Amino acid sequence: MSNIQPFIRWAGGKSWLIPHLKSIIENLDYQNYYEPFLGGGAIFFSLQPKHNSYISDINSELIDSYISIRDNPNEVIDILKEYINSESEYYRIRALEPKNTIERTARFLYLNQTSFNGLYRVNKQGKYNVPYGFREKWKYDYERLHIASQKLQRVKINCEDFSEKKYRIKKGDLVFLDPPYTVSHNNNGFIEYNQRLFSLEDQKRLSKYIDFIKRKSAYYILTNAAHNSIREIFSKDGDTLIPLNRHSLIGGKNAKRSLISEFIFTNIPKGVGKIE
Ligand SMILES: C[S@@+](CC[C@H](N)C(=O)[O-])C[C@H]1O[C@@H](n2cnc3c(N)ncnc32)[C@H](O)[C@@H]1O
């Protein structure tokens, strides 16, 4: 595992999962690595896959940013250096209509760093509509972009639904799955990450995708909300369910620590890593 930090703030980021994952895959000699719900890529950046990596997400602005940082980090940084962290500048840049992918990436990274909580939210017209975040001390960490760029060289990056290209998965590959939550932890309501809600039907589709991975004799690790409907959809013969609890800060000004439960499902055999 390496210590490379994600270059994007992302809701549902999984940095906290890294030590748990490390013990699950300890001694696992996997082949290619797949991460089809990439988001901020905390897990991808923490791993050192020996073979090919295939990373993807359905959010096209996000994926364009990964591609630009892989291929043109200096051009993106040149634009970012001209952007100032102030409320009026924020709304000016938010209203821009970028002419190419590099400009689009610079705008995306700037908004991601300076918006309220780094949220990604668009209105019905697909326009980013998160307000300014008043992060006074913000300064972009360009070194982090260069390090991410190095790590992304030779990585296959695609904007697509998770189930695309499933036929490429082969024996011994590892697929890490971190879908958006459909049901929230407290059993009511939904959490929306994107223009498209990840429905219970999508969770069932994901379960079939996992069946496909297993038929290929590949490995999967799924992280999902600890909820009965999720347990029913994803419990599979011979596989392991690991319940995890963690403390999380919820709420803005009146933030309080609350306990959040998460389920990890995997077909990695118990003897391989330290699975309790
Ligand atoms: C919980 S976040 C992933 C967070 C990531 N593990 C991290 O550490 O930042 C879920 C991601 O799934 C993406 N997503 C939603 N629906 C999808 C779909 N049908 N196929 C692929 N990705 C999807 C969202 O855009 C979002 O980035």
Image: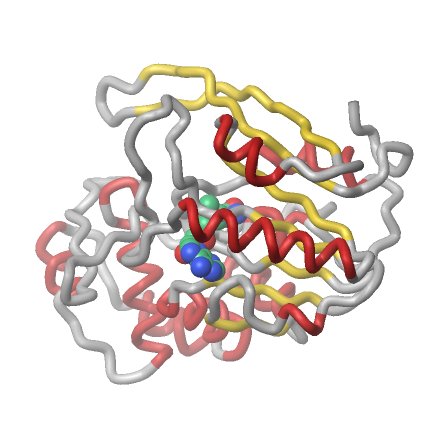
Q: Residue at x 51, y 49 (%)?
A: 204
Residue 129 sits in which quadrant? Answer: bottom left
Relative horizontal placement of residue 34, taking residue 23 as reference (left or right):
left
Question: x%, y% of residue 21?
Answer: 70, 38
Relative horizontal placement of residue 6, taking residue 91 as reference (left or right):
right
Q: Residue at x 38, y 54 (%)?
A: 140
Q: Nearer the viewer, residue 204 or 161?
A: 204
Q: How many marks?
A: 0
Camera sees residue 5: no
Relative horizontal placement of residue 218, taking residue 147 as reference (left or right):
right
Above or below, comparing residue 93 to residue 180 in the picture: below
Residue 95 sits in which quadrant? Answer: bottom left
Q: Residue furthest left?
A: 88
Above or below, comparing residue 158 to residue 33 in the picture: below
Q: Residue furthest bottom?
A: 99
Camera sees residue 52: yes
Q: Nearer the viewer, residue 188 or 114?
A: 188
Q: Nearer the viewer, residue 254 or 208?
A: 208
Question: Colour scheme of this structure image?
Answer: secondary structure
Q: Residue at x 62, y 54 (%)?
A: 44
Above or below, comparing residue 271 to residue 150 in the picture: above
Question: x%, y% of residue 134?
Answer: 19, 41
Question: x%, y% of residue 24?
Answer: 77, 36
Q: Residue at x 76, y 51 (%)?
A: 219
Question: x%, y% of residue 168?
Answer: 70, 73
Relative horizontal placement of residue 87, taking residue 83 as reference (left or right):
left
The quadrant in which the C terminus is found is top right
